[in-house]
Amino acid sequence: MLSIKNLHVSIQDEKLITKSILRGVNLDIKPGEVHAIMGPNGSGKSTLANVLAGREDYQINEGAVSFDHEDLLSLSPEERAAKGLFLAFQYPTEIPGVNNMYFLRTALNALRKQKNLPPLDAADFLSLAKAKMKEVGLDETFLSRGVNEGFSGGEKKRNEVLQMMILEPSFIILDETDSGLDIDSLQMVGRCVNSLRGANRRILIVTHYQRLLDYIQPDVVHVMANGKILKSGDKNLAHELEVKGYGWIESEITS
Amino acid sequence: MANKFIKEVVNQQYPYGFVTAIDSDTIAPGLSEDVVRLISAKKHEPAFMLEWRLQAYRHWLTLTPPAWAHVRFNPINFQEIIYYSAPKLTETKKSLDEVDPKLLETYNKLGIPLHEQSRLAGVAVDAVFDSVSVATTFKKKLAEAGVIFCPFSEAVQKHPELIEQYLGTVVPYRDNFYAALNAAVFSDGSFVYIPKGVRCPMELSTYFRINTAKSGQFERTLIIAEEGSYVSYLEGCTAPMRDENQLHAAVVELIALERAQIKYSTVQNWYPGDEQGRGGIYNFVTKRGQCRGAYSKISWTQIETGSAITWKYPSVILQGDYSVGEFYSVALTNHYQQADTGTKMIHMGKHTKSTIISKGIAAGVGQNTYRGLVRMLPGAQYARNYTQCDSLLLSDTCGAHTFPYIEVKNPSARVEHEASTSKIGEDQLFYCRQRGLKTEDAINMIVNGFCKQVFKELPMEFAVEAQKLLEVSLEGSVG
């Protein structure tokens, strides 16, 4: 169970002015469920994703997040990763000179160590990686390149999905993974995420648009605006939003 | 915040800071013409050497220390320095077994493979302790190939004609203040001669160690590669931890004749001073190679992690047509370390080519400066240079500076310069940690990735060493 209770988060900008971003978010995700959070720019969706993953730029003012009965907010990012939390980044960063395959294997073996599993050797890892690369549509040459170094936007996103497929995390957060992707890539993301759907896995999809949800059927759709979840419903809510726009929800709430 | 972690990672103890209690033959501090004569006499040098030293000394008296480098320190009192200190030898040693066991123990502590280990590693080692060369391994195997690899002082005795022909021809004593000082008082160093057409059968390696307090180390290295020969040479350096600063003013001269290749690698880990900036080595070094013959090549690779202040510009004079000069550098400054380092590529011949890859890493309040000169002389038809210099900042209090000088006097020559400065990304760190890597491992991974272009130029076994050294030097310093 992932349970977010009354989460209030702010950030300090470069001029040291504090801006409140999340203003009381409540959200429960049970094992096996897929949730989607939609909302306009600046609504706080990505902040929520980053706060859950442990990004330290934010100030947590109130509220709690428990993850399998543990206080998630007290854990470091690497501890959260070890517990199975995975964030597919909206803007994956480049790490020049660090071999993609080496990076992936180090990450996988760090997680395996946590689970008291023996490290995967280079040969075993290579065959695993090759199989998964086929699924995400990345050429094998990407293994020997630097992490995201010189990758196109779409290639970076595929590399995120590749990491997700290899690490097989128990709580996946996709932060606008669909943005900037063509139809083929969207289908691939859908296929991969669906292949990971399972009884013990939680998936949280953060997105602007409904189109990714054509490929991944969420159990619950939330609409976020102004740092709050304004409305939750089933997948039809996503369609309704697509037709009526976000303004509709906000006016509905205020009226 | 990540900064705190970076600080922890970057701060670590200097593991080589011990002093060896050993009986030394040391002359009183201070410099005069008599001291120069005394050093020359202790070395039983021929007259031409003494004459050269005296000329250098007299010239040095007319000079003032250079002040243009981007480094700050109190003036050095050259009369307080000990110019000669040698482990006391009762008689000449015939083999390693006769070397003072304490000395060998020191080298073992430093991880230097003097005995069997070195045979396994296939590395020939010359070890310079304070001022004199202690032992050179593998002389025999090298001799079979016709390679001369010995202490400089021995070369003066056994091969005076080579010394007289080449000494000071690349770095004349008039070159600069510290080069003049070195010429006057240097007490030892390494000498390498590779005969025509010979590919040196092993990596040659020298380790330098300053042991005696208040002593300066002034070594001099001369490498001559005859036509069509090849040699790869590596030097490493350490020193005890002391509160006062010690001066290291070395000179290295490389000469590559037609189609010869010299690969010179340095892993410099002199004591950098403590976290408050007390003590540490002043590393003021002049290194220069001359590609005299056509198609010759000189390649400098340096990993500079030690010293309180580093001031060095390993350079190449590209005289022969189609000759190639390379400079690969990683310079790390942590705590209060300052580095002003780079290279000079002087293109004289046609179709000469040079490559400069410089990676500066600054942490703590370290100051890291790249200073490089690319000069295309009128004869440098179709010469080319490519320069890339990148800086990585690990704290908000450190500094990175770049001073490229470019002079082109031939219209067909081409010069490219790329530079970048970036702060170690919170984004990169967070990305790695989100994937389950510890902060420390993430920093090491990012820094190593940053330096990869340079590390791959090092001989395999030293690349691993360099990577480890960087990790150690980084411990506790990014903020």
Image (tube, coloured by chain):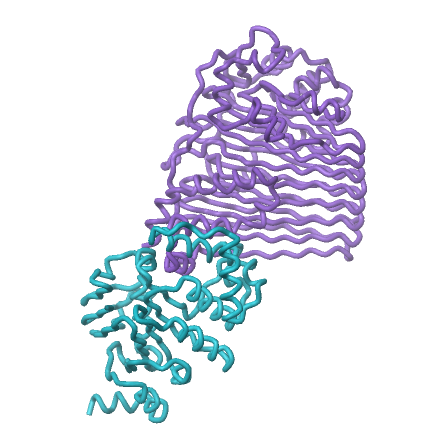
A183 or B401: nearer the viewer: A183
User: Is A168 drawn above or below residue B334 in the view shown?
Assistant: below
Q: Is residue A38 left or right of residue B367?
A: left
Q: With A230 as the anchor, is B254 left or right in this view?
A: right
Residue B366 seen: yes
Which chain did the image draw in purple? B
Where the N terminus of chain B falls, by quadrant? bottom left
Tell me if I can see residue B27 in this picture.
Answer: no
Locate residue A120, reporting x and y percent. Answer: 45, 52
Does residue B41 sit above or below B264 in this rendering? Answer: above
Of all chains in the rendering, the one displayed in cyan is A
Q: Position of residue B209 (x, y in %)?
A: 52, 25
Q: In terms of depth relative to the viewer, which is nearer, A232 or B90?
A: A232
> What percent of the width, then of the height, locates residue A215?
42, 82
> In the orientation shown, which residue stands out farthest toward the top?
B90
**How many numbered circles does the render carry?**
0
Identified at 60% across, 25% down, the residue is B219
Which of A178 and B343 lies nearest the eye of the viewer? Answer: A178
Residue B279 screen position, x and y as percent: 42, 30
Q: Residue at x 46, y 21 (%)?
A: B214
The residue positioned 53% from the left and 41% from the top of the image is B464
Residue drawn 56% across and 9% down? B89
Q: Nearer the viewer, residue B242 or B28?
A: B242
In the shown orientation, is residue B303 left or right of residue B21? right
